[in-house]
Amino acid sequence: MITVRRVIEFAAALSVVALAFHAGAQEASGASKKPFEPVPGMPGKDSVWVPTPFVTLEKMYDLAKLTKNDFVMDLGSGDGRAIIVAAKRGAPGLGIEWNQDLVDLSNKLAAQAGVSHLAKFERGDMFAADISKASVLGLFMLPDQLAKLTPKFLAMKPGSRIAVNGFGIPGWTIDQTEKATGDCGSWCTAHLYIVPAPVAGTWRLGDGELALTQSFQMLTGTLTAGGKSMPITGRLNGEEITFTAGDAQYNGRVAGNSMSGQVGGKPWSATKK
């Protein structure tokens, strides 16, 4: 005997099937497909997507002294805003993003902003990306991701600038930090790092020997001359080098395996051994 309850249950089941069939038909025809809209916190290949506030991006590029002569890159570029903001300042750039929907959205937003001739986007792995052409990086990453990419950062041309939102690069002393104002919530802090020239090793300085140990842009070592050694401390700002030995302060510029400058109003030069 079929009860009223069974009839109701059967009718309800038919309704569910009908709705599912209708939804499937709409999806197949494209009628129900909505435009892709990223949601903060959505998972990605290596991390969740959290956008950098626009005012923080502006502060990051202010710190980097971004010009139209720079080439900007963003790794894990999300909706493309870091590259689009740079393009609005006249700087060409490239965003690397794993999610193809975000790449497509970035291209769409760049076109709407009138900067698609400057702002380009590619699908790719941010850890495998070639960043050698970049003079500025605009990044928002977790510390472990920044640490993984640090060897690539240090291989960039000396003087290249890395502007990051919020998190610092582990072990690397920040060159400059500033706070953005306005609508930036918890993500108002911008850090700047300037890629230093590689100078670790032994150098012939006049009749003496300069032994340098380098930790990012910070320098320690010894200057040995006339049978005497004295400790030195110093730092790099891209290719610019400054170090102190005793009462003498050396200022100069690094050019590959040579460097030169002034000390006490007199010229000095050194060649790497």
Image (cartoon, rainbow, N blue to C red):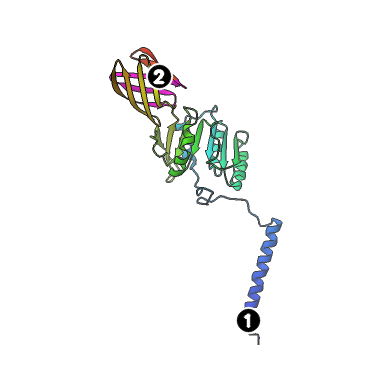
Give whichever of 143, 9 is nearer the camera. Answer: 143
Which residue sits furthest right? 29
Q: Which residue is mark 2?
A: 252
- Horizontal and vertical percent position of residue 16: 64, 70
Three-letter code, disc 2: Gly
Q: Which mark is residue 6?
A: 1
Q: Earlier in the sequence, mark 1 or mark 2?
A: 1
- Horizontal and vertical percent position of residue 260: 41, 17
Tell whether 135 sits left or right of 176.
Answer: right
User: Residue drawn 29% across and 17% down?
Assistant: 227
CB atoms of marks 1 and 2 within 8 Å: no
Q: CA distance from mark 1 to mark 2?
A: 90 Å
Q: Is residue 196 above or below residue 249?
A: below
Residue 211 belongs to the span the image colors magenta? no
Mark 2 residue element: strand
User: Residue drawn 71% across and 57% down?
Assistant: 29
Judge the density around disc 1: few (<14), some (14-19), many (≥20) Cα neighbours within 10 Å: few
Magenta span main SS: strand
How many numbered marks does the figure carry? 2
User: Residue drawn 36% across and 12% down?
Assistant: 266
Residue 216, picture quadrant: top left
Q: Nearer the viewer, mark 1 or mark 2?
A: 2
Mark 1 residue element: helix
- Horizontal and vertical percent position of residue 195: 45, 30
Residue 96, picture quadrant: top right
| Image: magenta residue range | 234-257
Quadrant containing the C terminus in the rendered view: top left
- Horizontal and vertical percent position of residue 170: 40, 39
Q: Is residue 1 above or below residue 81?
A: below
Three-letter code, disc 1: Arg
